[in-house]
Image (tube, rainbow, N blue to C red):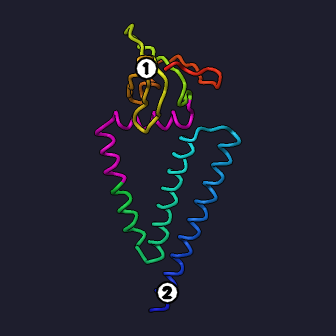
Amino acid sequence: MEYLNQFKIIESLVVFVVAFFIRFIISKSLRKIQTKFGFQDARIVVTNKIITILIYITVIVVVSFIWGVDEKQLLIYISSFLTILGIAFFAQWSILSNITAGIILFLNYPVKIGDSITILEKDSPNNIHGEIRDIGAFFITLRTPEKELITLPNSIILQNNIKYAPRTNEHKLPF
């Protein structure tokens, strides 16, 4: 019995070491990709966090199996958690739409941090103009020419027409 526990400890340590090296290699690769293709630092950091979370979840599942957690119990726990999460997101539909919009902005990124945009309101003459300061999971932050910070839900960027001017090295905004 003791030999079996020692073997499980060794297997668990091997899983942790392999996960650490995979995470290290992926982080290095992301930095090389950033340098080669000129991606923004913020996008690389977020991508690295997402990959790290996925690696840690995988490690927890593999170590759980090593230590004898029943597959059915684990699946029941995961499905219960996802059900509760789904109900919470459905109850707050706007949160889900903003998260989805944030993912679309992150992956497709029609606009980037530093770009100057104008959100063209459909039925209002009051358009919102500013420089993108941050794109988060739920909100986008703009800095107006009056140096005010405005946070808007990500879904606003996808639901409205926008006019934007990409930021270049020669073109620095006055605000």
Q: Residues within 10 Å of mark 2 (few under 14, many from 20)?
A: few
Q: Is residue 69 above or below residue 138?
A: below
Residue 13 drawn at (x, y percent): 53, 76
Q: Which residue is mark 1?
A: 144
Residue 99 in the image: above or below residue 66: above
**Which amino acid is tagged 2?**
Gln
**Looking at the picture, does residue 46 appear above or below residue 57?**
above
**Alpha carbon distance from label 2 to label 1:** 61 Å
* Left or right of residue 91, residue 104 in this image: right
> Is residue 100 located in the magenta-colored stretch of the structure?
yes
The image position of residue 21, as x and y in percent, is 61, 65
- Asked which secondary structure carries label 1, the reply is loop
First reached walking from the N terminus: tag 2 or tag 1: 2
Residue 169 inside the magenta-drawn segment: no
Residue 72 location (% of width, % of height): 39, 68
Q: Residue at x 49, y 81 (%)?
A: 9
Q: Main secondary structure of the magenta part?
A: helix
| Mark 1: amino acid | Thr
Q: Residues in magenta? A: 82-109
Q: Nearer the viewer, mark 2 or mark 1?
A: 1
Outermost residue, front direction?
Answer: 174
Going 43% across and 39% down the picture, which residue do you hit?
137
Task: Give SS at disc 2.
Answer: helix
Provide the residue designation for mark 2.
6
Image-quadrant location for residue 160: top left
